[in-house]
Image (cartoon, rainbow, N blue to C red):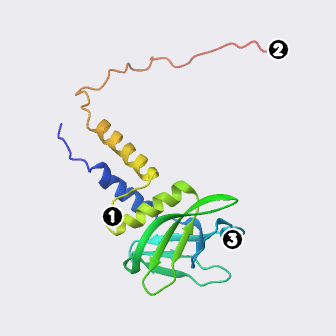
Amino acid sequence: MEQVELATPQELFKKYVQSYITKQCDFIVLRNKFSKASALDGLTPNQIHFDDKQKAIVIAPDNKNEAQVLKVATFESLKMDSAKDEGGQIKYINITIKGDKPLILQGQKDSMELWYDGIRSHKNLEPETETSKQKIEIFAKAKKYAEKPFPDSMPNIPAPPANLNFSTKLDIE
């Protein structure tokens, strides 16, 4: 049987995460800096996705704003940040943009971490979040399993019986 060279777990993860961020996701979107977690209270999430052709984050229009397209090439910095107040601590993605206001994205932890590393992958940076490391580990285990040699012969499964007319008598009262 011919051996096929499989991609590395990192290559598989990069394809996975870049595909993941092209799907619609709900994030709270802010276009200004904030210092307290309570600044996000009462805000409704926006739908965003990553446009692979434009290499840009697309924020869907809402009743207040038009659609926004923010190209990765204009990102000066990208980092996971956090804000704290009496209500607790929240994490968010903080993106500084050349000649524009910052972009703050906040949402569900796993999704946010995959988005963070997905954007990083478009800037040719290595993943660094725990969620991404767990996914890479899954790809590594899958690759290891796929590389196991399989037996040359298939297991012998007997043919079904000639007569499949089984009758049962159920006495249900």
Crowd around label 3: few <14 · some 14–19 · many ≥20 (10 Å) = few
| Mark 1 vs mark 2: in front | 1
Seen from this angle, which residue lies furthest bottom? 99
At label 1, the amino acid type is: Leu
Residue placed under numbered mark 2 in the picture: 173
Residue positioned 51% across, 64% down in the render: 81
Residue placed under numbered mark 1 in the picture: 125
Where residue 68 sits: x, y (%)? 53, 81
Query: Does residue 44 appear anywhere in the picture?
Result: no
Where residue 125 sits: x, y (%)? 33, 64
- Quadrant including the N terminus: top left
Query: Does residue 108 appear anywhere in the picture?
Result: yes
Q: Secondary structure at mark 2?
A: loop
- The disc at residue 43 is 3
Residue positioned 46% across, 79% down in the render: 70
At label 2, the amino acid type is: Glu
- Quadrant including the C terminus: top right
Q: On the picture, is 119 further left or further right than 34?
A: left
